[in-house]
Amino acid sequence: MNNRFKALPQISATSVSFATALISFIMLLPVAALIYQSIAEYLPFQTLVADDTFADIADTVLFDYVSNSLFIVSGSLIFASFFAIAPAWWCAHYEFNGRRYLQWMMVFPLAIPAYISAYIYTDMLDYAGPIQSTLRHWFDWQSPQDYWFVDIRSLWGASLMLGLALYPYIFLLLRNTFEQRSQSLTQAAQLMGASERKIFWTIHLPLARPALAIGCTLVAMESLADYGTVQLFAISTLTTAIYDSWLVYGSLASAAKISCLTLLFVVLLVGLEKNSRKKQQNFDSRNSKPSPKVNASKIKTTVIWLFCGSIFTLGFAIPLITLISYCLDYWVENMNDKVLIHSQSTFSLAIIAASIACLLAIVFNSQQRFSPSKSNQAKLSLSSLGYAIPGTVLAIGILIPLGQLDIWVNHFIQWLGFEKVGLIFSGTSFALIMAFVIRFSAISNGSIQAAYKQMPPNLDDASTMLKAGRLKTFSKIHLPIMTPAIISAFLLVFIEVVKELPASLLLRPFDFETLATYVFQFASDEQLEHAASGALLIIMVSLLPILLLSRSQKMH
């Protein structure tokens, strides 16, 4: 074994430390750039022309942007909690026919992007849609004035679409927490004569508040960052304001200021979640013996399947069946070279971004493993902050430094006597890859960190006794053990890149489409039928990591 170790060279710990510090700085650069761009015109040494766009927005529509965003976040939390809490408890507490299948089915809606469901339900519930047309035929209604019908293109409609798409975050976390509920606490409450319902509301749900807080934070951040759904419903939010400020008004400073305002809400959400977990630390009962499952009666089983089946049907079955119908009805439009071309470009970007994200996660976590310190832990934490940044905010934060870098490079090339090379950083796929790596490194970090935590320290001690260096220890011991975690991390990042829409819309090069932007462009033109094959491809690919998450029954 010692002879095999001698085959690999040593890597300086100082060089690794410097490299990780530099990478952490680059990952924080978008946030720093946003802050600088927001205050640049007020600095005394700047010669920038004052931009009045943000002042006009603040005087007219900023309140609407903020109030609509807060309404959608609150509404999506209400719907997601309603869809998730009871099913999570039923799947964890009761034993009934088909329970294992049901708890898988409840996660499937996570594979449907909210804007796809939004388009499908708009088409279905619109005035010319099949439901209203059927009702007018049955009741002989002649015009919209003859009856009232729900308006899906509303704040509540957007909240419902996001709630259906995002509730699995809460469901997964709560289900795992409820499955670890303390048997001793349950027995003590039963001895005191408490009913099953009272035990749930007074003991198990309060103990699950940390998991509920994490799930709600994820739902809130995703709702705040959503662009596709609110754009289809013509709802003005902070996300659409960022997009319009840059692409419509051409004001980068205004986009940066609104981005900073959005980041403030994200920081508040994360702070509330951290505070909630901190308060609950002394009430953790995971080390207690879990309670056994209770056999559900036939009536309860029927109620469970009706409720959960309805959610599954609304969140997954109807959109999927509708897309399949679109694809078959518009077969010629769907079976074209564009879908193949955009799939190839999307998968290429996803492979590159996932590979870089996994490599960085390995470097950061390995450094903390070999040299545990506060500075290394800080660098690891900083490299994971990107997931909390909405895609539109991150895109603006990346455009600012890369745009300036392009200017410097072109000036230097001209100074050398050559022609300009153009936007080689901000105008190419480089910007997209950078955004994907920064945004989704938290996912790869989580998987690798979990693998390291399950790795016994005595393996490192044995390697040290054999006088093996860090690179040898990693390549011969750590890497083989964590290979499944690396594969899982790669798949998760890959799928997130395939699904990412806001950052792709802002950073894509000219005449370049990802699957998400390709599908969204047709949806925004009310022609999703012509891109149904692309939407189905996104959904099918997204199901793979969802099945892995559901099967592992863990959320790191």
Image (spheres, rainbow, N blue to C red):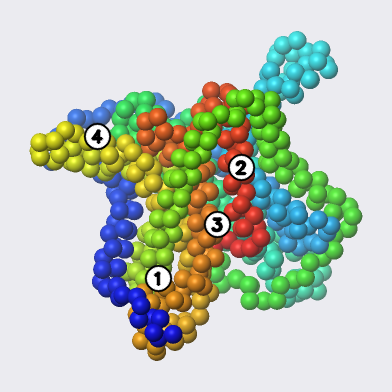
Q: Nearer the viewer, mark 3 or mark 1?
A: 1
Compared across the picture, whether 137 is left or right of 434 comes to right
Residue 214 is tagged as 3
Q: Amino acid at mark 2?
A: Ile
Residue 1 position in % (x across, y down):
44, 85
Q: Nearer the viewer, mark 3 or mark 4?
A: 4
Closest to the observer: 408 or 50?
408
Q: Residue at x 42, y 48 (%)?
A: 436
Instruction: Measure the alpha-carbon separation of dots 4 and 1.
Output: 38 Å
Q: Residues within 10 Å of mark 4 (few under 14, many from 20)?
A: few
The answer to the question of whether label 2 and label 1 lie on touching residues, with beta carbons closer than 8 A, is: no
Which sits earlier in the primary sequence, circle 3 or circle 4?
Answer: 3
Q: Amino acid at mark 4?
A: Gly
Q: Residues within 10 Å of mark 3 (few under 14, many from 20)?
A: many
Give the SS element for disc 1: helix
- Give residue 527's quadrant in the image: top right
Residue 366 is tagged as 1
Residue identified by numbered label 2: 539
As drawn, the residue found furthest toward the top would be 142
Q: Residue at x 55, y 57 (%)?
A: 214
As drawn, the residue found furthest toward the right would be 298
Residue identified by numbered label 4: 422
Closest to the observer: 230 or 331?
331
- Give residue 55's quadrant in the image: top left
Which sits earlier in the primary sequence, circle 3 or circle 1?
Answer: 3
Q: Amino acid at mark 3?
A: Ile
